[in-house]
Image (cartoon, rainbow, N blue to C red):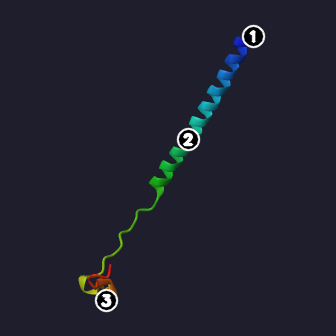
Amino acid sequence: MDFVSTAMVVAVVAVLMLLGIGMVVNQLFRLRKWLNAAPPVTPVAQPPDEEVRRPPEPPAWCTRPGRW
């Protein structure tokens, strides 16, 4: 009788494992489908060189030698 209960436990665990694997695979397939259906990303237009602004100069207290 002990053999039957062990076999039932193994069967239940195997069914639960297969169910879990099936759920994960299903989600991966859904993710692949969603990623393939995503619209393409449009590149950001780069402004001409003359319109590119430079970052502001740092304050004097940042560039003074010996401050740190």
Q: Give the crowd class for mark 3: few <14, some 14-19, many >=20 residues within 10 Å.
A: few
- Identify residue for label 3: 60
Q: Tell me the CA gap for discs 3 and 1.
A: 87 Å
Q: Tell me the CA gap for discs 3 and 2.
A: 58 Å
Give the percent coordinates (x, y) of residue 43: 35, 69
Decide which of 20, 63 is in the foreground and name it: 63
Q: Residue at x 53, y 40 (%)?
A: 25
Question: Quarter of the image holding residue 10?
Answer: top right
Is residue 2 shown left or right of residue 28?
right
Labels 2 and 1: the sequence-earlier one: 1
Is residue 27 shown left or right of residue 48?
right
The reply to whether callout 2 and callout 1 are in contact (CB within 8 Å) is no
Which of label 3 and label 1 is nearer to you? 3
Q: Considering the numbered disc 1 on the image, is that residue within a helix, a strand or a loop?
A: loop
- Residue kind at label 2, given as amino acid type: Val
Q: In which quadrant is the N terminus drawn?
A: top right
- Residue kind at label 3, given as amino acid type: Ala
Q: Residue at x 55, y 45 (%)?
A: 27
Decide which of 67, 4 is in the foreground and name it: 67
- Identify residue for label 2: 24
Question: Quarter of the image holding residue 60?
Answer: bottom left
Is residue 43 shown left or right of residue 3?
left
Give the percent coordinates (x, y) of residue 58: 32, 85
Q: In which quadrant is the C terminus drawn?
A: bottom left
Q: Considering the numbered disc 2 on the image, is that residue within a helix, a strand or a loop?
A: helix
Vertical relation: 62 (above or below) 1: below
Decide which of 61, 32 is in the foreground and name it: 61
- Identify residue for label 1: 1
Labels 3 and 1: the sequence-earlier one: 1
Vertical relation: 31 (above or below) 43: above
The reply to whether callout 3 and callout 2 are in contact (CB within 8 Å) is no
